[in-house]
Amino acid sequence: TTVTAVGFVGAGLLTYEQSLGVIFGANIGTTLKGWIVAVFGLKVELGVLSLLLIFIAALFMLIGKGVWRESGKAVAGFALLFLGFDFLKEGLEGGANAISLEQFSSSTV
């Protein structure tokens, strides 16, 4: 993301100030994502949580007006993020047992 933002500044598609927002947002988002997975990933079923959040977001977006509708969009974004985490967690669980680091010789590493 940083390289892309720098390229966009060089091409004149983004200003320097706009690129700082993109870079800071990407870096902070990546850090928060790791913390969310570390704190909640093993204790909470993210798939169930995300479906509940999607339901709440849909209610906000359908019934709410103004700030409530926009809040629903934000909640929907987090819900989809959690749903993606759940897909990643389920997809990687099978591969965790397939590869063992003990297979590799210490002389080749």
Image: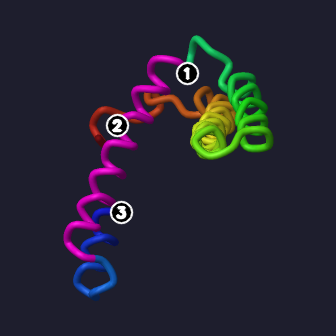
The residue lying toward the viewer, choosing from 47 and 106, is: 47
Q: Residue at x 51, y 29 (%)?
A: 100
Residue 92, can we see it? no
Q: Earlier in the sequence, mark 2 or mark 1?
A: 2
Which element type, helix, strand or loop, lies under badge 2? helix
Q: Residue at x 79, y 38 (%)?
A: 63
Identify the amino acid type marked 2.
Answer: Thr
Badge 3 is on which residue? 1
Q: Reply yes or no: does residue 58 show up in magenta.
A: no
Q: Which mark is residue 31?
A: 2
What is the x, y in percent for residue 28? 32, 42
Cβ–Cβ below 8 Å for labels 2 and 1?
no
What residue range appears in magenta?
A: 15-41
Quarter of image, res 71: top right
Q: Residue at x 61, y 37 (%)?
A: 75
Give the main secondary structure of the magenta stretch: helix
Identify the amino acid type marked 1.
Answer: Gly
Badge 1 is on which residue? 41
Q: Residues within 10 Å of mark 3 (few under 14, many from 20)?
A: few
Cβ–Cβ below 8 Å for labels 1 and 3?
no
The residue lying toward the viewer, choosing from 101 and 8, is: 8
Q: Earlier in the sequence, mark 3 or mark 2?
A: 3
Please name the colour scheme applied to the rendered image: rainbow
Which element type, helix, strand or loop, lies under badge 3? loop
Against 77, is 5 above or below? below
